[in-house]
Image: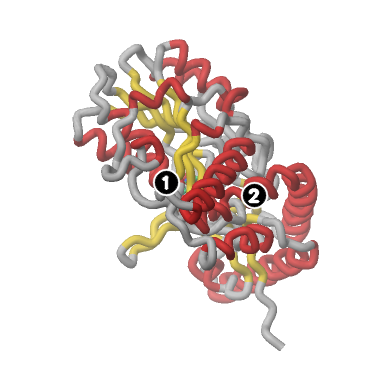
Amino acid sequence: MTPRRVYLDYHATTPVDPRAIDAMLPFFGERFGNPASRNHAFGWEASEAVEQARAQVASLINAPHRDIVFTSGATESSNLALKGLARAGGPRRHLVTVATEHKSVLDTCRVLEREGCTATVLTPRPDGLVDLDRLREAVTDRTLVVSVMLANNEIGTIQPLAEVSAIAHERGAIVHTDAAQAVGKIPVDVAALDVDLLSFTGHKMYAPKGVGALYIRHKTVLDLEPLVHGGGHERGLRSGTLNVPAVVGFGKAAEVAAADLEADATRLSALRDRLLLGLRSRIDGLHVNGTLAPRLPHNLSVSIEGVEPEALVLSMDDLAVSSGSACSSGKTSPSYVLKAIGRDDELALATLRFGLGRWTTSDDIEFAIDKVATVVGRLRALKAELGI
Ligand SMILES: *Cc1c(COP(=O)(O)O)cnc(C)c1O
């Protein structure tokens, strides 16, 4: 018997849904055409499949299909959005974002600062949400773009994006959102949110890795400078032959997500609540990171007092969860997201992030509760024994 392993790290990545795999398979083999081949049936067939996927992906976020550009993932989409705007050369050179954003946004803003932009990086409130009054103060009529993520990848908190858009648009700024963790998990409607650019990615929503999309509201197209030049694919915004099987899988995964979204969310939020209740009943000194509402239904992030962080994380061997630390060049440092919401280093390091997903069962949740409670009990006993 293989030892039991439980995966609760669906924020890091998800397996490909079998329905998406089935849809992809023909495009590796007999339907191998290049969608840019305009003069034969092999090309037409591939192009039709790509356009169907574009419609499926667009429909999931209530966008017109012409407003979707396929990319390699959310990192590329956010790079295209922010660099594309800044490098288009307009008079506005100011960027506004939040300290809890994904690195693909924060690091891109850093690069653009070296290219002559200025960036305001707002500290969020302790509950993880952006402070709308501070945002209102930060946005001026020199602001090019306001980039605020829809749902956070560590603490699952959901930003008041429609309000963010209203504030930005009042000053004539463009709104970009990184929705990589939200699309396919909660209803996302680009019209209701009134965003101009939205990044998302396949591998966080049961599609393959290496495919993603940028939604570009039609009227902002002319204001984007492409990152990749060449054959003029994707309306000139992203040259290069598309990864057709991955695009097809992305489309199918979007269709599946739209159909299952409500049922998945209801089931997973009940499991998540059970997880929190179970952990709380067995572990004292447990702190939830970020507000519990509004929050992704499948996310829980907790910091645990009185345990040696490294030992906590290393003891999770057969339970795949994320820690509250980042490791760069061999040095462990606390998560900048947890620091930004005011957690001290010690608690931030002693953090576990749970991401539930489509194949999470209640047995998995009971296993996780027992595992974490047992490990915490053992580590605390050891600490007491050693008198530290
Ligand atoms: C995963 C993730 C990304 C990066 O997506 P890739 O497709 O891996 O480039 C960006 N933002 C958030 C919030 C994410 O969770």
What type is the residue that disc 2 sits on? Asn
Location of residue 259 in the rendering, given as x and y in whole percent from the top left corner: 74, 45
Q: Residues within 10 Å of mark 2 (few under 14, many from 20)?
A: many
Mark 1 or mark 2, which is nearer the start of the sequence?
A: 1
Q: Which mark is residue 212?
A: none
In this figure, which residue is indicated by the disc labeled 2?
299
Tell which of 38 and 321 is nearer to you.
38
Q: Amino acid at mark 1?
A: Arg
Instruction: State the SS at label 2.
Output: strand
Residue under numbered circle 1: 38
Which of 345/153 is in front? 153
Give the image quarter of residue 117: top left
Q: Residue furthest bottom?
A: 1
Q: Quadrant of the N terminus?
A: bottom right
Residue 39 place in picture, x, y as percent: 42, 48
2 vs 1, front mark? 1
Cα distance between the residues tagged 2 and 1: 45 Å
Which residue sits at x=65%, y=54%? 285
Residue 367 sits above or below residue 206 on the image: below
Q: Is residue 172 above or below residue 115?
A: above
Q: Is residue 354 visible?
A: yes
At a point 67% along the width and 70% down the height, the residue shown is: 6
Residue, x 62% and y 23% (percent of image)? 192
As helix, strand or loop, the secondary structure at mark 1 comes to: loop
Q: Is mark 1 within 8 Å of ligand 1?
A: no
Q: Is residue 100 visible?
A: no
Task: Count residues near mark 1 (Cα–Cα under 10 Å), then give few for <14, some for 14-19, many for 20+.
Answer: few
**Camera-side residue of 205 and 343:** 205
Q: Nearer the viewer, residue 376 or 229?
A: 229
Colour scheme of this structure image?
Answer: secondary structure
Question: Horizontally, is 271 left or right of 189 in the view?
Answer: right
